Image (cartoon, helix red, strand yellow):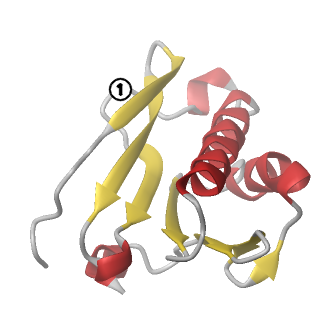
Amino acid sequence: MAEAEKDVQSHEISPDAEVAIERITTAAAMDSFPDSIILEVKPGPTFLLNGIEVPREELSAFIAEIYAPRSRKVLFARNDAERSDAVFEAAIEAARDGLEEAIASIEPRYRPGSGEYVGIKVIDPAAR
């Protein structure tokens, strides 16, 4: 697997965990996450999580519900090349809010700790 370029932005959740946004240049990075969930932004705009359409206003809550019981809190995101950056960035913010909500719903002693990756891996359109 090629080394992915990183443009990491962090968002503080608690003193011990944060949601990172990482831009990856290869889709091969998904291979290390066999139970991957992929957020796709399609024309319309339409928001899909592993092919299931989710209304924009329900995206954060839906992601929180999915990720609360999951031990691995990694979401992949892919932007359809025809969509505007503003629509995609809004979807990423909704996803980040959902991951934060999922972590907040976990009993504190079971929350991800310092150094544990919680984040969104944005797949570069050229990596398809």
Residue 117, percent across and down? 37, 44
Q: Examine the image and state in which quarter residue 82 appears.
A: bottom right
Q: Quarter-wise, where is residue 16 in the image? A: top left
| Residue that lies at the very extreme toward the top in this rendered image | 15
Q: Percent from the top left, x then y, of residue 128?
A: 36, 87
- Of residues 3 and 123, the one nearer the viewer is 123
Q: Does residue 123 appear to the left or right of 105 in the view shown?
A: left
Disc 1 designates what residue?
Answer: 114
Q: Name the side, left or right, on which 77 lies relative to 106.
A: left
Residue at image coords 46%, 47% = 119
Q: Secondary structure at mark 1?
A: loop
**Nearest the eye: 61 or 106:** 61
Q: Which residue occupies 62% across, 73% down?
A: 40
Give the total of numbered labels: 1
- In percent of width and height, residue 110 lies at 59, 33
Which quadrant holds residue 94? top right
Quadrant in which the N terminus appears: bottom left
Q: Compare residues 60 and 72 and report the one nearer the observer.
A: 60
From the viewer's perspective, is residue 31 above or below residue 98? Answer: below
Residue in view at x 36 percent, y 34 percent: 9
Q: Amino acid at mark 1?
A: Ser
Q: Residues within 10 Å of mark 1 (few under 14, many from 20)?
A: few
Residue for point 26% across, 45% down:
7
In front of the other: 35 or 83:
83
In the picture provided, is 124 more to the left or to the right than 60? Answer: left
Against 125, is 93 above or below? above
